[in-house]
Amino acid sequence: MKKTAIATALLLASGAASAATGELCMFDATGAVLDGGWATSCDQSITASLSLSADASANTITSSELLLGDRWTAHDITTYTAGTYSVDTGAGMYNFTVAEGQVGAHMLLDWGLTSNIDVVNVWDVSSSGDIQTYTSTDWDGDGIPGGAMLDSGALVGFSASFNLEGSDLANVNITPPSAVPVPAAVWLFGSGLLGLVGVARRKTV
């Protein structure tokens, strides 16, 4: 799987928001970087708030910079652990696999007057101490980081690759998924079943 050289660096501190700078890179169908009107080849002013265990509606990525002259924001970001998934965009299906050691994301991109453009990214995740690096991958096998968009006229065929990078980690808070406790009622139910089994056995003796 081809990986973009741009990485996501995320500092995880217990109970504290971690900080990072990041980039949005847009690629056309040939893999060329789209000139979005930024001072550099990619938008290097993105900020993100992502929790791998929170409701997707709370997850956002945005920027102070314009994309081709219009404001944009990504919202309702659903994250995925290892598995195979399908997302129906209304204009086609995204079918993607998240391997062990990866995190997947499906998000809705608002750009100018166009709302809810489906975008999927799959990141490789590596760690060094408290630093985690999220690297955007070519998950759809077309040789381009990110996945080709299916459902926006002006951006169909373009790939949006979201990355966070660097050691100046500002404005990003990535929270790992928390363990889901087994409700106490389940334990009580199990204890009750064992009790009934014991009673039944005594009656048959």
Image (spheres, rainbow, N blue to C red):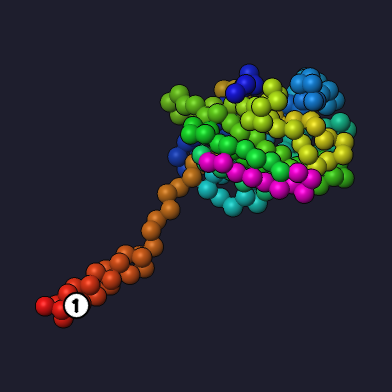
Residue 203 location (% of width, % of height): 16, 81
The front one of 59 and 87 is 87
Residue 92 location (% of width, % of height): 76, 44
| Predominant SS of the magenta segment | strand
Task: Tell me if 196 is positioned left or right of 55 in this view.
Answer: left
Q: Which quadrant holds residue 154?
A: top right
Q: Is residue 196 visible?
A: yes
Q: Which quadrant holds residue 187?
A: bottom left
Hey, which residue is sitting farthest bottom in the picture? 203
The structure residue drawn at horizontal position 15% and vertical position 79%, both measured from the top left corner, is 204
In the picture, the quarter occupied by the C terminus is: bottom left
The front one of 3 and 87 is 87
Q: Name the residue under label 1.
A: 199
Task: Tell me if 205 is positioned left or right of 100 in this view.
Answer: left
Task: Tell me if 188 is positioned left or right of 127 in this view.
Answer: left
Numbered range of the magenta stretch: 83-92
Residue 176 location (% of width, % of height): 49, 41
In the picture, the quarter occupied by the N terminus is: top right
Q: Can residue 38 be seen in this view?
A: no
Residue 129 location (% of width, % of height): 43, 26
The front one of 186 and 83 is 83
Q: How crowded is mark 1: few (under 14 residues within 10 Å), some or many (20 or more)?
A: few
The structure residue drawn at horizontal position 28% and vertical position 72%, both measured from the top left corner, is 192
| Kind of residue indicated by mark 1 | Val
Q: Helix, strand or loop at disc 1?
A: helix
The structure residue drawn at horizontal position 80% and vertical position 42%, both measured from the top left corner, is 151
Task: Tell me if 39 is positioned left or right of 83 in this view.
Answer: right
Hey, which residue is sitting farthest left in the picture? 205
